[in-house]
Amino acid sequence: ANQYLDSIFSWAGIFGRIEISLIALFILFFILKLKQKILVLFLFSVMHAIELFLKLFIERSGPPFEFYRYQVGENLVDSYSLPGSYPSGHGARSTFVFLILLHQVVSSKKLSFTQKNIILSLALPIFIATIVSKVYLGEHWMSDVLGGILLGLTSSLVVYGVSFISFKKLS
């Protein structure tokens, strides 16, 4: 066990928490002028509800406690704990937020190429560290995290699918 990595990944895992994910979405709303605010918040909420539903009804235990290596104080640990482990909510939320950010940055006409590269160079390692942290710290199995990534990916694709269809009808 490497306490240095345990600490780094414990802090990285915070980025997938619901409070941090919502703060990131609200920052995107103001900084990048995200036009689909209501749709994004609605699908973020639906995604979270699906995650909770699946955790309640899919009887899947997380890794045994002996694998658990979380190093951050208890006051920063998620305020609720459900019996199921599948899918990873951190995986779903961090994927959703990262993909919304990715789309907004890449499609932005206001940001220069250099600014886009800086933003994505900061966001990508945080996203990867958040995903890896859940398995590394023994909080989830890899399949739980992959399920969360799939849920976040699907939810973000729905945002842009609905937006594309809506904007096409308007023109």
Image (cartoon, rainbow, N blue to C red):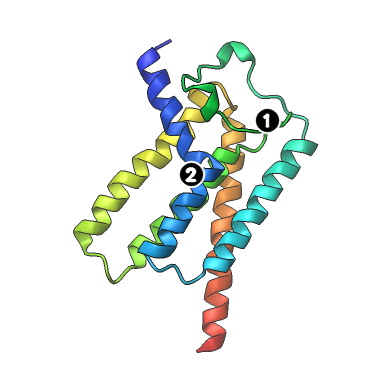
Question: Residue 151 in the image: x percent, y percent?
Answer: 61, 48
Question: In this rendering, does residue 94 appear at all?
Answer: no
Q: Amino acid at mark 1?
A: Ser
Give the quadrant of residue 113. Answer: bottom left
Residue drawn at x 77%, y 37% is 56
In this rendering, position of residue 153 left or right of residue 56: left
Question: In this rendering, does residue 10 appear at all?
Answer: yes
Question: Residue 115 in the image: x percent, y percent?
Answer: 23, 58
State the residue in front, 93 or 73. 73
Quadrant placement of the N terminus:
top left
Chain-order first, disc 2 or disc 1: 2
Q: Is 78 placed above or below 45 here?
A: above
State the residue in front, 135 or 9. 9
Give the structural element (helix, strand or loop) at label 1.
loop
The residue carrying pointer 2 sits among few (fewer than 14), some (14 to 19) or many (20 or more) residues within 10 Å by Cα, namely some
| Residue highlighted by disc 1 | 81
Residue drawn at x 47%, y 19% is 71
Give the quadrant of residue 130. Answer: top left
The residue carrying pointer 1 sits among few (fewer than 14), some (14 to 19) or many (20 or more) residues within 10 Å by Cα, namely few
Q: Amino acid at mark 2?
A: Ile
Residue drawn at x 39%, y 13% is 3
In this rendering, position of residue 32 left or right of residue 69: left
Can you tell which mark lies on residue 20? Answer: 2
Q: Is 38 placed above or below 93 here?
A: below
How far, Cα to Cα, is label 2 from label 1?
Answer: 17 Å
Question: Residue 160 in the image: x percent, y percent?
Answer: 52, 67
